[in-house]
Amino acid sequence: MIETKAFSFEMCEPPTLGKFGIKQNMQKQCKEKPYNCQVCDFSCNAKYLLETHIRIHTGEKPYSCELCSSSFKTKSHLKRHIQTHTGEKPYSCQVCDLLCISKTHLDIHMQIHVGDKPFSCEVCSSSFKSKRDLKAHMLKHSHSCEICHLSFTRKAHLMAHARTHTGEKPFSCEMCGSSFSQKPHLKIHMLTHTGDKPYSCEVCGSSFTVKSNLTVHMRIHTGEKPYPCEMCILSFTTRSALKTHVRIHTGDKPHLCEVCGASFSQKSKLQTHMRIHSGEKPYSCEFCDSSFTVKSNLTVHMRKHTGYKPFCCEVCGTAFTEKSSLTKHTRTHTGEKPFSCELCGALFTVKSNLEIHIRKHTGEKPYSCEVCGSSFQTKYVLKEHLQKHTGERPHSCEACNSSFRTKSALKVHVRTHTGEKPYSCHVCGSSFTDQSQVTVHMRRHTGEKHYQCDMCNASFTTKSQLEIHVRTHTGEKPYSCDVCGSSFKTTCHLKAHIRKHTGEKPYCCEACGSSFKTKSSLEVHRRSHREEKPYSCDACEAAYTTKAALEIHMRSHTGEKPYSCEVCHISFSRKDRLKTHILKHTGEKPYSCDMCSSSYRTKSALDTHKRIHSGEKPYSCHVCASAFSVKSNLTLHMRSHTGEKPFLCDVCGTAFARKEHLQKHMHSHTKTDLSQDLRTSGYLPTDINPDQTF
């Protein structure tokens, strides 16, 4: 035993220590650390340890690898690094044959088999496999934050942490001016300028600026999720993801908004939320003027331009830009409706639809129009409503330049060009361009008419039909023509009217190329090609292509003439005939011939007149090849071949081919009846011939 400064120690192998060894061993026993770092509080008992430590501050790495140019602070680190090239692992575990680079690693590994943790913390009783782990642990007790009480193994880490409270960012980027609280963060940031990503994935080739990001990325390929949740069965690839997840169970939301008091479980969500108050949208689209508060929203938006749809339905193959859209779509196949209304039991596939539905019960309309004060249950409906005030129609058809307020309306309109009718009636098989049309159509089968008029008790299948009907009582015509001032009850009537001014005929027949102002006119015209006449008369065998034509025909049986002239009180069965008749009183002849001064009350009369100039005779007899400019003349001519005489005298039974011949014939009966009355009265001699003229 050697006694030195009242400290005693037991020497091991005294012949091998020498003078330097004895001195160093004495310093260990008495815990003396005479070598102090002038930069930080580090102290040690050996000069070479201090020299090694100082290289942390100077950045000096004097030991270089000849194979990969990597540099190291100590010779032992270099030696261990070279073994990564040579693959040398000289220390072998006798239990599991694991090979280790150093004896220290082997010693630590062996404790896995024996379960031994011989090093205990005197403060908190934690146990560790190695003295090094205990030493690192003990530093947590010595370096603690006074504000949040977090502990750190190194004083430098505590100082870096303290900057999160003070907001200090002493490390600045010389290229863009960004500041950081820690030097490693600045170093990582600099890689965004250089574009350097030194850590590459061997599986997919992805590159990363930080090794830790590569480590996390590799778990995508391996499927490794080393951080399990103790409260549920979920596992996570990163500790931070687990920490965030645990707050779902605990309800902890430590990040508070100073403006509105909202709290969040993640700092990133708070930062995103703050942009609502600031109006900041830092993520902008390169193709259009759209900007977003969150980068993920920009990523989804960009797929509209690129057409990229990474989420595909395994059942029908439909692809989507967002995973949430695929999830909603999948429920159409499974029939799953996980969200139910507690008041009426209605089921919904999406939670937002349930929230909107509940407002029908509560009557809540949280979205108000600043222009007219109208309130709406959804933000989307308010947005559509505002376009009525602005006149904005942002969605245009590429085929006919028609524009619409909503994208869904444009989508339905495009089907008029493509002929697509994806929605079918399961009762009669009729197809429709829109689901709402099927809903309305089904009421024909059920006879259901929800909407009743308060003035005349008439019922209708849709609310819009009722609103239009009510205008027949009120006389309201809210839609006016800017060109001539004419007013109309519906927008579709106004649109059809405007085409008279513009000459536009957007609806074209595929069979013959004829164009029409309205879709209904085109549909009626198509029946002429199909020889379809779906509206039949119950009184006779007559059939018509339109319901209106049948109603007019029925008046020939009933004798009804609902349209009366206010001047001479003559009545007509058709409104257009009353209009033509009124022109007799006014003397107006609005249709003029371009080639002569003749003018006519009706367009058809003008068209017939023009054939005098052109010599056109479009109506030909298939028997004798005679041609006529007017269809009625052909009809009369055909009776000369068929012998048909449809006009019959009620007095004598004589038949005539033409109506005017019957009228002339009727005069002969009128004269005979008059002379007979005169003879009977004694005013006329009995020998006078009634046809004699005086």
Image (cartoon, rainbow, N blue to C red):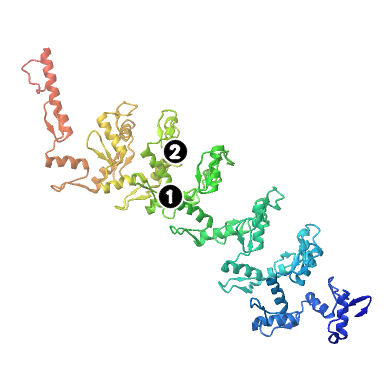
| Quadrant housing residue 518 | top left
Q: Which residue is mark 1?
A: 412
In x, y percent, where is residue 223? Answer: 57, 66
Task: Please state, as top left, top right, bottom left or bottom right, where the N terminus lies in the image.
Answer: bottom right
Above or below — where is 144 with respect to 592?
below
Q: Which residue is mark 2?
A: 464
Residue depicted at 65% across the width and 59% down the height:
242
Pick the residue in front: 76 or 564.
76
- Left or right of 673 in this view: 13: right
Q: Can you tell which mark lies on residue 542?
A: none
Disc 1 crowd rating (10 Å Cα; few below 14, some 14-19, many 20+) is some
Res. 440 visible in picture: yes
Amino acid on which disc 1 is placed: Val
Pick the residue in front: 125 or 553.
125
Mark 2 residue element: helix
Residue depicted at 70% across the width and 77% down the height:
106
- Left or right of 578 in this view: 98: right
